[in-house]
Amino acid sequence: MELTKNEFIKAIDGKAIRIPENDFEIGGISIDSRTIKPKEVFFAIKGERYDGHDFLNEVHEKGGLFSVVERDIGRNVVLVKDTRIALSQLASFYRNKFTPLTVAITGSNGKTTTKRLTSLVLERKFNVLVSPRSYNNDIGIPLTIFKLRSECEILLLEFGMNYRGEIRHLSEVAQPKIGVITNIAPVHIGNFGSLEEILTEKLEVTSFCHTVFINADDNMLMKAIEDLKRRKRVVTFGIKKGDVKARDITLTVDGSIFKVDETEFFLSLIGRYNVYNALVSIAIGDELGIDRKEIATALQKAVPEEGRDRRIRIGDILIIDSTYNSNPVSLLSVLETLKLLKGRKIAVLGDMLELGEEAVRFHREIGKRLSEFDIKALFTYGELAQEFAKETNPPSVSSYNDVPSLVSSLKCFVKAGDIILIKGSRKMKMEKVVEELGKAVGSMQ
């Protein structure tokens, strides 16, 4: 890292205890005692399951320079009031040592895929540092920033949002000049109360931006566009309308083909929603002077990631692995894609969480609509997911609260030619269903 001990302590306003007085270089930052390397500094973060303060001996034995802590343990530590806040303070200081163009992508759905596609495009011309997978909170963003080096031209980040003020906090740390809002949907609405509040929070990403890219087909975002245009340069994207607009869209089990103006694009990611994600990367590529043919070539390299509508073929059976997360908008989107595919369609649906007081209503409304998507059988997993079945029409419906029973029933039910969608919120760990079903079905081939 381009950081010294004295800079470090000043940035976080910490109290050094038994640390050498001479200045020296910091090798890196870690929050995981299992992977810490010599000359790295350890931040003792308190998590839901673990407290980093319990692993300080391990850090010392592995050659960590010192640890940032919230309580004085009397040995080579820097004492602060809150290690999580100190992590952000250090990231803000470190970010200001460099001059990359920072791009921040937020929105209710599609952030990670949009970031990944945009990275593929920007890497055709620039040196890009991109946050890994879903490093999108006040821990993941700092850890990404600490990887900045002088040769980096673009810092590409994803901003998640679980509580009020989080987007503003991340913006203050990362200072994005280009912001993207993919859409507004009832994701984590239990933490915010209304779509209007979600919109207000998402718009905080624009606080440091000079240019903002927003979805022209999103009604909530369009409510804010006139005010936004008075303060920022706004570029819109969409399918129905937009400055960057997709047309002649063909959706298949192998992906999407569409045109923007006269350039044709192929994306091996299924679903209309991934066309929106690709449009962001095209719009930002245009903004930064990348030729459309170069953009098309870059997007051809995109592949489905685990849990994000990845297609898994086991003999004559197709599994759609959509287990990374679930909410009403993302579930309806993948169901619309499922409708296009030929075969008997089975939905394996887990709880949609963090929907607040409206959770039961959201589950039941989707249950009512399952027949629209040609779903022939519904298997639910979890307590809330049983609400899918309360007012649904598929001829076969069954509910489970444990993976072995669910997989056992699925194994007996599936047959050649079936298409199985597996989707649920992150905490439901529906990837276990994918893994066990894959083993069970594979043994039948």
Image: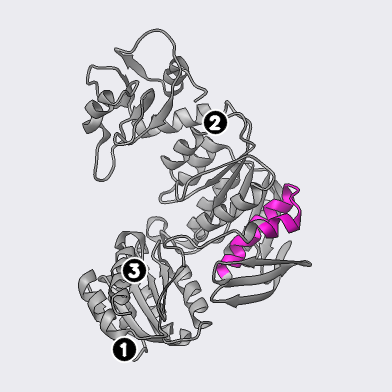
Q: Amino acid at mark 1?
A: Ser
For disc 3, the marked residue is 434
72 shown above or below 374: above
Q: Residues within 10 Å of mark 2 (few under 14, many from 20)?
A: many
Q: Nearer the viewer, residue 44 or 147?
A: 147
Q: Amino acid at mark 2?
A: Arg
Please tell me whether mark 2 sits on a helix, a strand or a loop: helix
Q: Any magenta on residue 285?
A: yes
At 47% from the left edge and 18% from the top edge, which residue is drawn?
Answer: 4
Whichever of callouts 2 and 1 sits on the residue coming sooner in the sequence is 2
At 65% from the left edge and 54% from the top edge, which residue is drawn?
Answer: 213
As drawn, the residue found furthest toward the top would be 22
For disc 2, the marked residue is 95
Instruction: Inspect this view and state whether residue 301 appears.
Output: yes
CA gap, disc 2 to disc 1? Answer: 55 Å
Quarter of the rendering containing residue 255: bottom right
Q: Which mark is residue 114?
A: none
Instruction: Inspect this view and state whether residue 242 appears.
Output: no
Q: Which residues are magenta?
A: 273-297
Q: Amino acid at mark 3?
A: Val
CA gap, disc 2 to disc 3? Answer: 40 Å
Please tell me whether mark 3 sits on a helix, a strand or a loop: helix
Q: Residues within 10 Å of mark 1 (few under 14, many from 20)?
A: few
Cβ–Cβ under 8 Å for marks 3 and 1: no
